[in-house]
């Protein structure tokens, strides 16, 4: 009986499903953070499997900064319709009223429009557990985070004081006001995600596939001109380039890569060959070495 | 890469198996450097990661102008500043032959619980020693924890060989000492490899400096050692995690197989109730499955409607697990607050959470000599063998047979922290053999003969707060109304039943446990029982509450500020405690945890004892207790 027939992907799938069921059974008001990208797509696909033939016993929630790619929003609405799920969309209306934007407000933008909006939504809707699609291979401080990651009543993460997590025995006990962030994809790598998408034929937003898109080049990064709100410097003219995105976020903060990959197979082939890790496409992570840890402590996913 | 190449690549990926291993060793043995070197030499670092590594090395590095590989894995800010590893970090890499998940765990003794965390899911342990230092206290501890958590394969990397002139004699000395140490621990395979993580000798490539060493490099060994075996338990074990009921026509049981396999038509039993039925379907999105193996997360439909809920275990009808409410287990203590025998904790085993307490610490393990020592409690990072008693029977296997169904964690019921991790050795049969004697004259009968209902009035508060004074008046008033009562007073009971107990936290817990049991017996006899005990800890008051019938326990908090108690000081105890003559005195050098939800709270600074006693009587009247 020593030989196992499960492949690496089957093991990862089983682990994620186990985690989701544990949350459904242990928390009164769980929610799944849905950010529309490939990791969220995999997470949602796994949730559909975990509770089949029932629907997942929790709603999806999207924190909309107002600066997402237009194609992301249409893909989001299409996906929710296809699965027949409940979607909550939350936005920091105060931030919108103050005109907070990614150009003038730097890292405050992320804090106000993403982190604060998420924290406010968690409190308002009294969610006690929230799934996120983060993986430990993305970034160094994520590598040290638990699968069931405790947040105190102020939604703060204390990395030096985490609950020990042994075997598959997750401690789900919390007091009123406290919550747990749950990461069912903790042990997946970027390549695992792509292989699984390929194996399971999971639909993705078209932005992942190469196409002619209008971009401007800034500090070596290609930024897509998704709408008229992107301020252009004098003489800066958007050019049509064959590009795609390895990660999706707010369009002014998410750099494209030049690529001819128009099929899933080609994307996976490119991913295997590429020599730059995916978060490099996210401008907010490059500010300083420990910036992600700080953001996470404050409540960022 | 063309499509054909990609297909070949993906097919190869699918065939790869997975080895989960952890690295551990003492501070500065070079664990993080070794992992960084594995990633670097396997060319698994992305260009931007290398760029940031070079800038980080200049800023925080401990390797001078060289690249400091440890910075790849030391992710937290405090670690980078202090140049140490403080929490377990997980890393992922793959070679041509295998996929790997690495848990990098800290060497500092205070973080040993994190090593146990990393070890709980690992197939192999990679232990490091510094060739100059040889085996350390931590090496022995880590080797022991590795064995305790059921890891069968061990690699000892003797690191920093460059600093001992690549000496074969030094290596042989350390290897010999470790083999002697490991002989008692029963590992299935053990490899000892001389390396320099910093310079790369024998990590992924053979060293040019140690031609005397003929064995494999670290990576070669990791690629060839047998993987898996973690889910190898042969008999079906299916802990039910979630009952899936989308509508009245479908009832499926969701869970992950913790052993064996399952197929439609197979006869299974529900472990606790012993009920037997057959599997009718294994449901999955798309088509039903013809069978499922250990490790798979599935949904099972049964032929018969029997009562099954989360926490039940479906098992091979021909080969069943233990079902008991007491067992012996190895326990690793993981919290700053010591284990207190008798205190109720929450035990999580599989999907089941159940109140449990340690009834006896048989011994603590000395991790240096592996010898046994007597212990009254377990402190942070202690390992002990204990008897554990549960509120209800659970199904389990010995940990040696099944890592999933034989492991548990203990959770503190007030802080909700994970305080202990346990591995079950065997069931204790005592509970099964001492059955409850059914008594013909019930507690109701006894109480109604007295024309009353049993109540336990539990007075808690600081020494000198006025508990006994008020309890005494309440008892007189009840007696005057023709009620049958009995008063248990802390000081008096300590002269008799509890005269063997002192004032340590462990003894205080036992003190309250015994009084709660006595109060319960009096309540069974139909009496209104007054208990006047400081009873400083919430956990034990909760234990007492749970020993009684619902609604029977009435907590009376005598709320007197400590300076008022100290000023009254009827027995001169505060003066003694303050001068240091009296140790472990509640409120001075031992904590008092005030009740949060007492039924009755009496403020002795606003009214006299007589009036406060009347409030207790009035409460009993209003709530229909007398």
Image: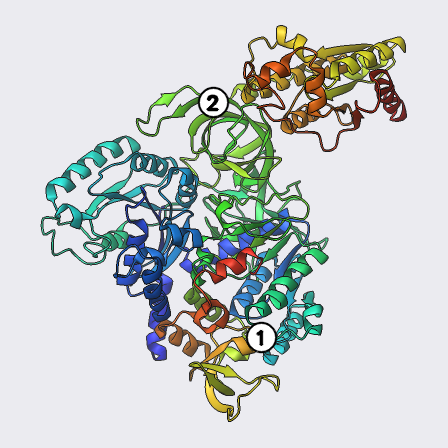
Q: Compared with residue B156, is residue B33 higher up or lower down, i.e. above or below?
A: below
- Residue at 53%, 75% (x, y): give it: A253
- Which residue is at 47% across, 22% downward? B361
Kindly report which numbered mark, 1 or 2, lies closer to the viewer in this rendering: 1
Towards the viewer: B578 or A301: B578
Q: Which residue occupies the extreme top position in the image?
A: B496
* Residue B576 placement: quadrant: top right
Q: Chain of mark 2?
A: B
Instruction: Report the residue marked by disc 2.
Output: B361
Q: Position of residue B537 (x, y in %)?
A: 63, 26
Q: Label 1 is found on which chain of the structure?
A: A
Cβ atoms under marks 1 and 2 closer than 8 Å: no
> Does residue B103 appear in the picture of this structure?
yes
Label of residue B172 in the image: none
Q: Is residue A64 left or right of residue A202?
A: right
Q: Nearer the viewer, residue A72 or A102?
A: A102
Please rate how many residues cluster around mark 1, counting C-alpha atoms within 10 Å: few if below 14, some from 14 to 19, many from 20.
some
Q: Which residue is mark 1?
A: A102
Q: How is the image coloured?
A: rainbow
Question: At 35% from the left edge and 74% from the top edge, which residue is drawn?
Answer: A273
Give whichever of A18, B60 is nearer the camera.
Answer: B60
Res A185 seen here: no
Indicate the position of residue B571 as horizontal and vertical percent values. Answer: 67, 10
Q: Quadrant of the N terminus of chain A?
A: top left
Up-down relation of residue B356 to residue A78 (above or below) = above
Could you say whether the residue bearing mark 1 is in a helix, strand or loop?
Answer: loop
What crowding class fits label 2: few (fewer than 14 Cα within 10 Å), some (14-19), or many (20 or more)?
A: many
Label 1 to label 2: alpha-carbon separation: 59 Å
Q: What's the residue at 42%, 48% (across, down)?
A: B88
- Residue B562 x %, y %: 69, 24
Residue B252, position as x, y percentages in the image: 62, 51
């Amino acid at each position: 009986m020593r030989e196992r027939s499960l492949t690496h992907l089957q093991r990862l799938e089983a682990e994620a499903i186990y985690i989701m069921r544990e949350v459904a059974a242990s928390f009164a008001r769980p929610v799944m953070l849905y950010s529309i990208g490939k990791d969220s797509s995999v997470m949602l696909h796994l949730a559909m499997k975990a509770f089949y033939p029932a629907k997942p016993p929790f709603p999806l929630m999207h924190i909309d900064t107002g600066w997402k790619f237009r194609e992301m929003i249409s893909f989001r609405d299409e996906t929710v319709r296809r699965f027949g799920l409940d979607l909550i969309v939350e936005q920091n209306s105060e931030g919108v009223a103050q005109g907070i934007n990614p150009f003038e407000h730097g890292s405050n933008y992320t804090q106000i429009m993403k982190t604060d909006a998420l924290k406010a939504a968690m409190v308002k809707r009294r969610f006690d557990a929230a799934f996120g699609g983060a993986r430990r291979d993305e970034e160094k401080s994520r590598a040290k985070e638990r699968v069931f990651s405790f947040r105190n009543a102020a939604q703060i993460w204390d990395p030096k004081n985490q609950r020990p997590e042994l075997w598959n025995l997750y401690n789900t006990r919390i007091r009123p006001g406290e919550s747990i962030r749950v990461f069912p994809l903790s042990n997946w790598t970027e390549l695992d995600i792509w292989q699984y998408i390929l194996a399971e034929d999971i639909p993705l937003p078209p932005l992942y596939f190469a196409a002619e898109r209008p971009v401007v080049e800034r500090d070596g990064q290609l930024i897509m001109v998704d709408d008229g709100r992107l301020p252009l410097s004098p003489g800066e003219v958007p050019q049509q380039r064959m590009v795609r995105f390895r990660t999706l976020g707010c369009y002014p903060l998410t750099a494209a890569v030049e690529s001819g990959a128009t099929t899933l197979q080609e994307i996976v082939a490119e991913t295997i060959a590429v020599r730059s890790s995916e978060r490099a496409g996210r401008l907010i992570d490059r500010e300083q070495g420990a910036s992600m840890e700080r953001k996470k402590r404050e409540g960022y996913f | 890469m063309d499509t054909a190449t990609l297909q070949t690549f993906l097919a190869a990926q699918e065939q790869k198996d997975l080895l989960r291993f952890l690295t551990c060793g003492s501070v500065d043995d070079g664990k993080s450097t070794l992992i960084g070197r594995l990633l670097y030499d396997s060319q698994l670092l992305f260009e931007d990661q290398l760029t940031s590594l070079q800038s980080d090395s200049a800023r925080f590095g401990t390797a001078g102008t060289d690249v400091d590989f440890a910075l790849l894995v030391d992710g937290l800010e405090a670690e980078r500043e202090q140049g140490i590893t403080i929490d377990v970090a997980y890393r992922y890499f793959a070679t041509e032959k295998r996929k790997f998940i690495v848990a990098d765990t800290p060497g500092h003794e205070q973080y040993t619980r994190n090593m146990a965390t990393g070890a709980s899911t690992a197939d192999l342990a990679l232990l490091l020693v510094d060739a100059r230092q040889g085996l350390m206290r931590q090496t022995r501890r880590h080797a022991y924890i590795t064995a305790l958590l059921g890891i069968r394969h061990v690699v000892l990397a003797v690191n920093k060989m460059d600093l001992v002139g690549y000496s074969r004699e030094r290596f042989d000395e350390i290897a010999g000492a470790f083999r002697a140490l490991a002989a008692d621990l029963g590992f299935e395979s053990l490899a000892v490899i001389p390396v320099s993580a910093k310079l790369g000798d024998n990590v992924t490539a053979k060293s040019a400096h140690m031609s005397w060493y003929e064995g494999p490099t670290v990576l070669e060994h990791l690629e060839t050692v047998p993987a898996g075996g973690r889910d190898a338990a042969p008999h079906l074990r299916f802990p039910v995690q979630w009952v899936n009921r989308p509508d009245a026509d479908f009832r499926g049981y969701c869970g992950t197989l913790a052993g064996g396999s399952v197929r439609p038509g197979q006869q299974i039993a529900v472990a606790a109730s012993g009920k037997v039925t057959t599997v009718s379907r294994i449901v999955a999105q798309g088509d039903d499955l013809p069978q499922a193996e250990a490790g798979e997360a599935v949904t099972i439909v049964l032929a018969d409607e029997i009562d099954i809920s989360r926490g039940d275990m479906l098992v091979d009808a021909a080969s069943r697990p233990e079902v008991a409410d007491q067992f012996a287990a190895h326990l690793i203590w993981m919290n700053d607050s010591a284990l207190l025998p008798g205190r109720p904790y929450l035990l999580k085993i599989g999907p089941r959470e159940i109140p449990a307490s340690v009834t006896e610490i048989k011994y603590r393990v000395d991790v240096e000599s592996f010898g046994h020592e007597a212990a009254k409690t377990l402190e942070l990072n202690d390992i002990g063998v204990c008897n554990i008693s549960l509120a209800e029977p659970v199904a389990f296997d010995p940990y040696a047979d099944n890592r999933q169904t034989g492991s548990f964690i203990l959770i503190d019921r007030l802080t909700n922290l994970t305080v202990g991790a346990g591995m079950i050795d065997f069931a204790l049969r005592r509970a099964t053999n001492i059955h409850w004697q059914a008594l013909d004259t019930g507690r109701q009968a006894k109480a109604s003969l007295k024309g009353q209902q049993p109540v336990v009035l539990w007075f808690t508060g600081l020494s000198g707060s006025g508990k006994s004074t008020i309890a005494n008046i309440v008892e007189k008033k009840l007696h005057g109304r023709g009620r049958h009562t009995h008063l248990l007073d802390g000081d008096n009971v300590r002269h008799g039943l509890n005269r063997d107990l002192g004032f340590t936290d462990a003894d205080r817990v036992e003190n309250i446990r015994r009084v709660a049991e006595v109060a319960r017996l009096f309540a069974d006899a139909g009496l209104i029982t007054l208990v006047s005990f400081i009873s400083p800890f919430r956990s034990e008051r909760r234990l007492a509450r749970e020993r009684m019938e619902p609604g029977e326990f009435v907590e009376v908090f005598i709320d007197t500020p400590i300076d008022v108690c100290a000023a009254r000081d009827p027995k001169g105890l505060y003066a003694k405690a303050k001068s240091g003559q009296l140790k472990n005195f509640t409120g001075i050098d031992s904590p008092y945890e005030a009740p949060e939800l007492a039924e009755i709270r009496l403020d002795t600074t606003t009214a006299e004892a007589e009036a406060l006693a009347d409030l207790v009587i009035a409460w009993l009247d209003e709530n229909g207790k007398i």
